[in-house]
Image (cartoon, rainbow, N blue to C red):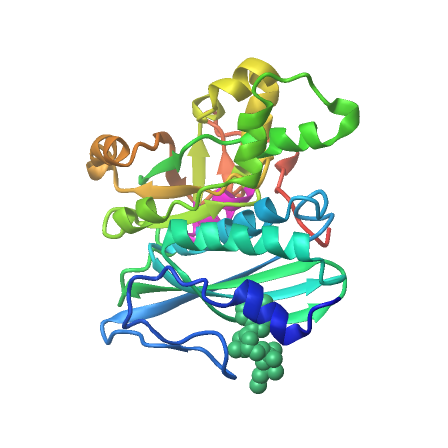
Amino acid sequence: MSLSEFELIHKYFSRIDYCDDADAIGLGVGDDCALLTVPGDQQLAISIDTLVEGVHFPDADMAFDIAKRSVAVTLSDLAAMGAEPKAFTLALTMPGSNRVWLQGFSRGLREAADEYGIALIGGDTTKGPLTISIQVHGFVPEGAAIQRSNASLGDRIVVSGYLGDARAALDLFDETLKLQHPKERYIKERFYRPQARIALGQQLRGLASSAIDVSDGLLADLGHLAKASSLTAQFDPSLLPLSPVLSNHWGAETARGYALTGGDDYELCFTVPEAREHELVQLSEQLGIPLTVIGKMVERFEHDCIDSQGQPFDGEQTGFQHFS
Ligand code: ADP
Ligand code: MG
């Protein structure tokens, strides 16, 4: 027996509420709109991401992982702005109401909501090719959001965590390249279980002059930051933070290429005034996240990113684009 739309919403998408800020959520799932109460000294930070089967994940099999990943990649934008997530809405288009799939998907949403302390406050459910849109809502103190356009000359360029792992996971999904890989699990988890760097983003308020999350590849995203700040980003590719698994099993050259242009890592790339660079050591220790200085912002040049010799990177790689 198939579920009606309302039974489905009630069973799988109600009561996913892990926001401990009772004042923030005025009204959740069930009415025509959800209501959020934004404190007077805060701004509402909003971002939306859409994930399409075959484009953003290989197939629909792993409902639990797809749900977790969808929430994390969307929250990554709030992290980059220094916002504190409170709630999310979900527009779900799917070919049918497969209970096993919905159960896995709902469980993944619940786990992600619990991990980040957010509430599912509404959405829309329609029939069609599997497509997941998630909108997230967070609060940030008025004027404190970290924008990508605010880097200054001489600021140090910093990257969190490791880059390139998620790109390596794509090699493992492709059967022809399937490696008998002892660390397959680590690499695949880096694709399916990205961490939105929420705590880091909030700690960067008042420290970072600008920030962006690395979703389309470092060259592309740091390029956006440089352009928005009317500067050029100069960095040494040999300083890019690589996980031991990536550099040991894919080799240094491939690993560096993946770190430069591979997307989906959802680390933060940000700039810090030179005089405050030393504060990164303690922050890294406190959060247990590597923070690596890879270069500095220099006068605007014809390229968005250049290497230590002042040369542009090969082929002006620009990362993933849907309509190119
Ligand atoms: P309306 O017809 O008024 O737009 P719907 O019938 O689409 O409302 O949805 C009924 C309620 O269920 C609304 O509160 C809506 O936000 C919520 N809802 C619908 N789909 C989802 C979903 N996938 N996840 C969470 N809430 C949902
Ligand atoms: Mg309505």
Image region (quadrant) for ligand 1: bottom right
Residue 228 in magenta stretch: yes
Residue 90 in view in this figure? no
Q: Residue furthest right?
A: 176
In the rendered image of this protein, does residue 90 appear above or below residue 112?
below
Question: Which residue is at 53% across, 43% downward?
Answer: 302
**Could you tell me residue 168's position as x and y percent?**
61, 28
**Could you tell me residue 282's position as x and y percent?**
21, 32
Residue 115 in view in this figure? yes
Residue 102 in magenta stretch: no
Question: In the image, 123: left or right of 136?
Answer: right
Question: In the image, 5: left or right of 78?
Answer: right
Question: In the image, 143: left or right of 98?
Answer: left
> How many numbered discs?
0
Question: In the image, 53: left or right of 200?
Answer: right
Quadrant where the N terminus sits is bottom right
Q: Quadrant of residue 154?
A: top left
In the rendered image of this protein, does residue 90 appear above or below residue 188?
below
**Could you tell me residue 209's position as x and y percent?**
30, 49
- Residue nearest the viewer, comparing 296 with 170: 170
Question: Which residue is at 62% across, 37% downward?
Answer: 316
**Stretch of the chain drawn in magenta:** 220-231
In the rendered image of this protein, does residue 224 appear above or below residue 36?
above
Question: Which residue is at 44% across, 39% downward?
Answer: 233
Magenta span dominant secondary structure: helix
